[in-house]
């Protein structure tokens, strides 16, 4: 039930949205641009059953004006099997109704699908920190930006981002 899922979502989605999507929305708004677009989400692996669809739909329903503004969302049903490269989630609508929530719905789809198909739903924060430190050691003074939010559920991202900062990340998305 979408209404129950919406109750579990954060009241304010903005802390969980990639900065570059927020900035993109700001620029589009300042320039008066809001074209009709088609966004598609797909996986690089497959065939696998899709998960997180209902939560992603609840996010769109709670936070976006896509349907109110005449847009449409097409998605494979929860548990349906998709093939590598096949669109699993398609949104048609005004770009400003879509762009600022992409991180959230991609995170719901990727984290839930990965967890259901691999059994991986835990992460080791120390390992994340160590891996970021290894990368930082390799790149020296060059800037390191962690941009993995779209791969994790919104409820996990704050802890993972903190581990990336402790490991030496200079910024996050």
Image (spheres, rainbow, N blue to C red):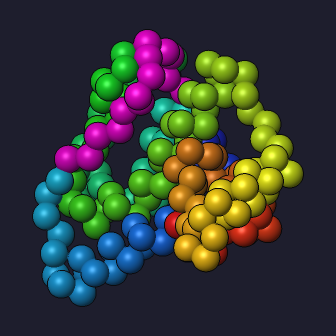
Image mark count: 0
In the image, taking residue 49 as reference, residue 24 lies left or right, namely left
Q: Position of residue 161 (x, y in %)?
A: 69, 62
Answer above or below: position of 13 versus 62.
below
Compared with 82, 149 (above or below) is: below
Snapshot quadrant of residue 36:
bottom left
Identify the residue at horizontal 48%, vertical 33% (top origin). 53
Q: Is residue 148 visible?
A: yes
Where residue 24 sits, quadrant-wise, is bottom left
Is 41 within the magenta? Answer: yes
Magenta span covers which residues? Answer: 38-51
Q: Which residue is at 63% across, 70% downward?
A: 140
Q: Position of residue 51 (x, y in %)?
A: 54, 27
Query: Is 86 left or right of 33, judged from the image as shown?
Result: right
Residue at the (17%, 53%) spot, across then down: 37
User: Is 84 positioned to the left or the right of 117 in the image?
Assistant: left
Quadrant location, the N terminus = top right
């Amino acid at each position: 039930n979408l209404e129950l899922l919406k109750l579990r979502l954060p009241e304010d989605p903005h802390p969980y949205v990639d900065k570059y999507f927020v900035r993109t929305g700001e620029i589009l708004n300042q320039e008066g641009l809001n074209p009709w677009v088609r966004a598609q989400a797909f996986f690089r692996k497959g065939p696998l059953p899709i998960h997180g669809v209902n939560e992603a739909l609840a996010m769109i329903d709670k936070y976006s004006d896509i349907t109110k503004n005449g847009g449409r969302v097409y998605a494979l049903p929860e548990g349906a099997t998709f093939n590598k490269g096949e669109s699993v989630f398609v949104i048609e609508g005004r770009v400003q109704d879509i762009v600022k929530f992409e991180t959230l719905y991609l995170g719901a789809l990727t984290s839930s699908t990965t967890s259901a198909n691999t059994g991986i739903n835990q992460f080791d924060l120390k390992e994340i920190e160590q891996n970021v430190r290894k990368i930082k050691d390799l790149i020296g003074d060059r800037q390191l930006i962690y941009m993995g939010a779209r791969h994790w559920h919104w409820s996990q991202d704050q802890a993972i981002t903190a581990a990336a900062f402790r490991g030496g990340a200079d910024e996050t998305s």
